[in-house]
Image: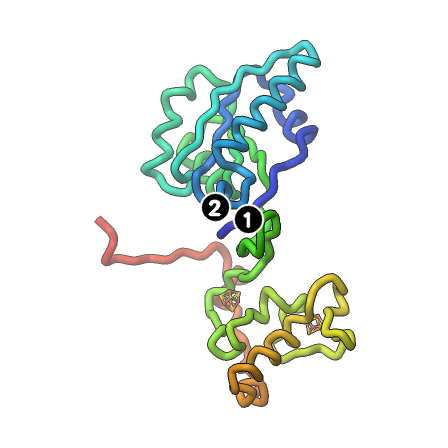
Amino acid sequence: MIMGEQKPLEVILGMLTPYDKIVLAGCHGCVTVCRAGGAKEVEILASSLRLARESEGRPLEIKEVTLERQCDPEYLEAMRPYLEDYQAILSIACGAGIQFVAEKYPSTIVLPGLDTTFIGVTEKQGLWAERCQACGNCVLHLTGGICPVARCSKSLFNGPCGGTTTDGRCEVNKEIPCGWMMIIDRLRSLNQLENYRKNLPMKSWKTSRDGGPRRIVREDLME
Ligand code: SF4
Ligand code: SF4
């Protein structure tokens, strides 16, 4: 899922300084799962904003909405009825959702209440971790199901780099395991160490962000 964290309250309050009536928009997608931008977070953030603004003597009127998804056009219509009466939308969806709201309502001010961080997994309650950097050409079949792009701090394709600590940690951040040590251990446990002995082919980054904004076209699904 796409992970994100709400911006600090004082940062959000700073963005809202010019406004007295806003729509606060959450999303039932990834940001609900990572507890950063769903209906519950909309409710809590709205209360905090109201309290903070009341204490400043400048009440803030907030319309709370949580859309099924902010990255899908069919759900964005739900906000339209409120736009005439409110000065701005504060979205706590991921960056894709926030931008799609802005595209859909070009004359409405749309503000980001959330910092989008990474594509990751829930390791356990309250702990999420990065797993994929969306390189566009997956090599997990060669690396024992562990991503060298996201799990090695230097995104090496033929590691380790020589900086692995004796207990298998990464020299860049000793809090995290060396991605390449994990790959080797996993290949060993799968009896696939021959994959490690071959150099991985030179990575083409054409499919990653380096070629500019990416698109997927599926003509079979188009109307
Ligand atoms: S190889 Fe690329 S697509 Fe596969 S998990 Fe890593 S970053 Fe994601
Ligand atoms: S120590 Fe391991 S994870 Fe860290 S940069 Fe080197 S190979 Fe990558």
Say what amino acid the circle numbered 1 marks.
Met
**Any mark on residue 29, and which?**
none
Residue matched to label 2? 30
Residues at circles 1 and 2 in contact by the CB criterion of under 8 Å = yes
Q: 196 or 211, which lies in front?
A: 196
Residue 199, percent from left and from top: 57, 86
Q: Name the element at disc 1.
A: strand
Q: Position of residue 93 (x, y in %)?
A: 50, 39
Q: Secondary structure at mark 2?
A: helix
Mark 2 residue type: Cys
Q: Quadrant of residue 183?
A: bottom right
The residue that label 1 is drawn on is 3
Q: Label 2: few (<14), some or many (≥20) within 10 Å?
A: some
Mark 2 beta carbon near ligand 1 (under 8 Å): no
Residue at image point 58% right, 15% down: 60
**Relative image position of residue 130 (x, y in whole percent):** 58, 58
Eyeballing the image, is 104 above or below 23? below
Position of 136 compared to 8: left or right?
A: left
